[in-house]
């Protein structure tokens, strides 16, 4: 039917695994914003949730690394990490193999994507689900962009992947919610863990909310690594959601660096009902897709 | 130098409880199928977290290896800092893109104040 919801939210194992070590006031406002995002998503009555993630060597490795992958299974198990370490119990998350297949076939018109009939969720997906669908009662379609092992797909391809997801979501009868999850600046699991470049993050979020394609694509990985760490490579997931949102503009509902979580904690959404949002991606791509199919 | 195989072993170890059990039993034997230098084997057997980070092992892989050895989070971060201090900047892989001069030098580059004493403990909580 359509893409009914599009937003971004942070992941990091510390968000759930080390919650007791954060400033309770900031932490609770962040959690509340996450829960409000869940409520806003539910109000759009989605039939399924696509999570665009940047997994961390849970399924994909340098022996055969896909730039883009989409899950195609009726269930996914997670977390792959020690549940006690992550603070999230091991569960079986519902998927929808048939829906995945139809989405993947459609995405393939514009983006070369690997499919995966088996996928173990790591904290990159489990942390968002912990807040967004804590009862695991909404089918999930996991999508992944390689943000960990260079060479990494260029940002403009991440944008196109988002456009491809949008075209696919608009082509199926189901109502689809889309959530991207990633950095922004952070240096996860390194000696610099806890470092956050707030100024860089706010500049990026300004570009994201304006949905300014050329500004969003105007980063190179050398500069990202220098200013935003290797965790900054995960902006690809945010950029994909921008591509999916067409001309919609967005709102940052929450942003605060929480060093103990090692990431600038972010909750933001696009207003798909607003100007530009309902149109889907602009440009010739969708037309080309109609012709191509 | 075969960072790929060091990481491949750790990737497979992280995913497999069966391999973890065999690693606990005989650390050396489970490494045989991997193309490793003597230095790499030794670092994986000891385990030397700082040296593995210096080799360029990705933290997203290394942190689970540290957890398997019950190395507390703050100690894990400190081991990486010590490794860079002792052996020099990261040799290869994603962290070698621009070299690495240490946490405080890096803060200065970003225009941020160096971490005050005690901040390591604060940082230690994050990931
Ligand atoms: Fe991540």
Image (cartoon, helix red, strand yellow):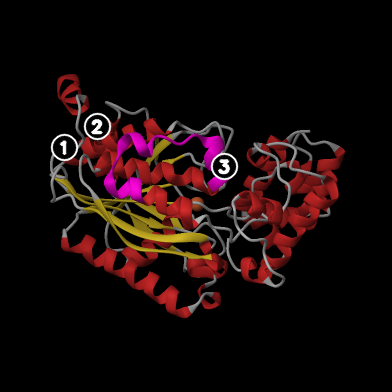
Residue bounds of the magenta highlight:
A206-227
Residue carrying label 2: A106
Of the numbered discs 3 and 1, the one sitting upstream in the chain is 1
Chain hosting mark 1: A
Going by the image, does A7 lie left or right of A122? left
Dot 1 falls on a residue whose secondary structure is helix
The reply to whether the magenta stretch includes residue A290 is no
Q: Image check: A46 left or right of A67?
A: left
Disc sitting over residue A130 in the figure: none
Q: Secondary structure at mark 3?
A: helix
Query: Disc 2 on helix, strand or loop?
Result: helix
Up/down of A260 relative to B14, above or below: below
Labels 2 and 1 positioned on one and the same chain: yes
- Left or right relative to B11: residue A267: left
Q: Which residue is mark 1?
A: A171
Q: Is residue A242 visible?
A: yes
Residue A234 image offset from top left, x and y in percent: 46, 45
Q: Residue at x 54, y 57 (%)?
A: A196
How many C-alpha atoms fall within 10 Å of the one at disc 1: few (<14), some, or many (≥20)?
A: some
Question: Label 3: which residue?
Answer: A225
Between disc 3 and disc 1, the foreground one is: 3
Which residue appears farthest toward the top when viewing the image?
A: A291
First along the sequence among labels 2 and 3: 2
Residue at 61 percent of width and 58 percent of height? A193
Check if mark 3 and mark 1 are on a common chain: yes
Dot 3, how many residues are within 10 Å of its Cα: few (below 14), some (14-19), or many (20+)? Answer: many
Q: Quadrant of residue A144?
A: top left
Proximity of marks 2 and 1: CB atoms separated by less than 8 Å: yes
Q: Position of residue A90 (x, y in %)?
A: 47, 65
């Amino acid at each position: 039917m359509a893409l009914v919801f599009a937003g971004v939210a942070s992941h990091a194992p510390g968000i759930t695994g080390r919650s007791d070590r954060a400033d309770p006031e900031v932490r609770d406002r962040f959690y509340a914003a996450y829960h409000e995002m869940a409520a806003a998503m539910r109000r759009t009555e989605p039939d399924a949730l696509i999570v665009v993630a940047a997994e961390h060597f849970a399924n994909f490795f340098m022996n055969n690394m896909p730039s883009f992958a989409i899950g195609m299974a009726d269930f996914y198990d997670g977390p792959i990490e020690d549940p006690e370490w992550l603070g999230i119990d091991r569960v079986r998350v519902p998927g929808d193999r048939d829906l995945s297949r139809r989405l993947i076939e459609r995405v393939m018109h514009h983006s070369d994507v690997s499919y995966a009939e088996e996928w173990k969720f790591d904290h990159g997906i489990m942390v968002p689900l912990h807040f967004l669908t804590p009862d695991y009662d909404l089918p999930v379609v996991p999508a992944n962009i390689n943000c960990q092992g260079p060479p990494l797909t260029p940002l403009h391809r991440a944008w196109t992947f988002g456009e491809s997801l949008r075209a696919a979501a608009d082509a199926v009868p189901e109502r689809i919610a889309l959530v991207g999850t990633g950095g922004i600046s952070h240096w996860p699991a390194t000696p610099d863990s806890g470092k956050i470049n707030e100024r860089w993050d706010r500049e990026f979020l300004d570009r994201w909310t304006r949905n300014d394609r050329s500004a969003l694509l105007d980063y190179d990985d050398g500069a990202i690594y220098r200013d935003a760490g290797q965790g900054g490579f995960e902006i690809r997931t945010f950029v994909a959601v921008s591509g999916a949102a067409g001309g919609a503009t967005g709102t940052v509902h929450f942003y605060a660096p929480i060093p103990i979580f090692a990431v600038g904690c972010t909750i933001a959404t696009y207003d798909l009902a607003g100007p530009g949002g309902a149109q889907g991606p602009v440009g010739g791509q969708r037309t080309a897709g109609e012709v191509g199919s | 130098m075969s960072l790929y195989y060091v990481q491949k072993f750790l990737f497979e170890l992280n995913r497999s409880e069966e391999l973890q059990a065999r690693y606990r039993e005989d650390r050396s034997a489970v490494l045989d199928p991997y193309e490793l230098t003597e230095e790499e084997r030794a670092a994986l057997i000891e385990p030397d977290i700082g040296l593995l980070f210096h080799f360029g092992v990705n933290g997203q892989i290394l942190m689970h290896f540290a957890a398997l050895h019950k190395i507390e989070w703050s100690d894990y971060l400190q081991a990486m800092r010590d490794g860079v201090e002792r052996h020099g900047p990261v040799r290869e892989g994603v962290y070698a893109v621009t070299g690495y001069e240490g946490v405080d030098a890096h803060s200065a580059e970003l225009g941020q104040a160096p971490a005050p004493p005690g901040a390591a403990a604060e940082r230690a909580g994050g990931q």
